[in-house]
Structures are given as structure tokens and as C-alpha cells.
Amino acid sequence: MPWLTADKHQEEVEAARDIVLRRLGRSSAPRAALAELLERKEVAPHVAEEVLDRLESAGVVDDAAYAATLARTRFAEKGAARKAIAEELRRKGLGEEHIRSALGQIGFDDEADAALALARKKLAATRGLDPLVRRRRALAMLGRKGYSHEVAMRAIEQALAGPD
């Protein structure tokens, strides 16, 4: 009867693989999120690890690529600062080496340019308000996006100085 346990194990592996592949069919996800999904579905830990290891070795689950894509997207589409992107990647369970590598795509000059563009946009949208209110709102918006106080203040001063 040992084949019964082997068959049962294979069925569990296939079921777990199907769960992961269905999830990845919607959008990419880091290994930690997939492990959490399998845990919620009450998949045995050794089966989950086996499935994730196989998919990782096949390149289906790739935390480095996921981190790089998320960093590029958050920076380009939302203007998020490196700090905010790093925090999001950590919340998603990515390791520090993947985070460092992903953030390596975004230079400090790129970040300063993005902060300046965001500051200009916010200041233009608040043109009729009191100057202190405009500064405060621009500073708060940049802070929410993860920019340091220093970078935000420099961007606001530059934006107020006029187009360069």
C-alpha cells in the first residue's frame, strides 16, 4: 500500500500547484505571498515548500523580477520614493538583497527629479491658496510618497523658483 501515500502526496502537490498557478494567472506575486496563500488553504507546509521550490527553480516564481518590476512601476506611475518602495517590498515579504537590487534601478537624481515634478504639479494645483498652505500641502504629499524632508524641501524651493 505504499503507492497510496505516494499517490496522495502527488495529488496534494498537484492541488497546491494549481492554487499557486491560478493566483499567478491574475498577477505576479512574491514567494512569501504564495506561501501565505497555501497556508490559508491549509496545504501541508512540506507540500507548499516543495511546490514553491519547483516553481522557483522553473522561473515561474521569481522574487528578484517581482521586486524590480514593482519598484519600476511604483516609481514611474506613482512617483513613490525609494523609501516607500522599500517598505512596500518588505511588507510583501521580499528579502533585503532583492530590495537593494530593485532600488538600484532608481538613482538619487531620478528621485530628486521625480520629487521636483510632483512638487510643481501640487503647487500648480494649489495656486490660489496662501503660500504657506501651498508649501505645507506639497510637503505633506511628498512625505506621503516617502520623500525625506530634505529632498521635499529642496524640490519645493526649486519648484517655487520657477522652471529650470
Image (spheres, rainbow, N blue to C red):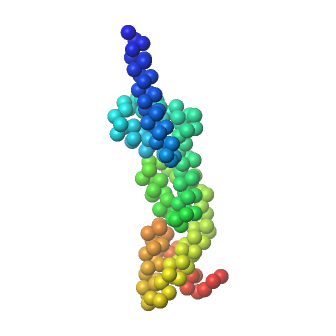
Picture residue at 45% right of the left edge, 88% below the top: 129
Residue 49 shows in the view = no
* Residue 87 versus residue 116 in the image, above or below: above
- Residue 57 sits in which quadrant? top right
7 or 132, which is in the foreground?
7
Picture residue at 59% right of the left edge, 57% below the top: 104
> In the rendered picture of this protein, how many numbered marks are placed on residues?
0
- Residue 161 sits in which quadrant? bottom right
* Residue 77 versus residue 153 in the image, above or below: above
Picture residue at 48% right of the left edge, 84% below the top: 126
127 or 132, which is in the foreground?
127
- Please state if 155 lies on the left or on the right of 139 as rendered: right
Name the residue at the right extreme.
Answer: 164
How far from the left and from the top, in percent, is residue 68? 57, 52
* Residue 64 versus residue 49 in the image, above or below: below
Q: Quadrant of the N terminus?
A: top left
Picture residue at 36% right of the left edge, 30% below the top: 44
How far from the left and from the top, in percent, is residue 87? 45, 58
Q: Quadrant of the C terminus?
A: bottom right
How far from the left and from the top, in percent, is residue 61? 53, 40
Residue 61 shows in the view = yes
How far from the left and from the top, in percent, is residue 74? 53, 60
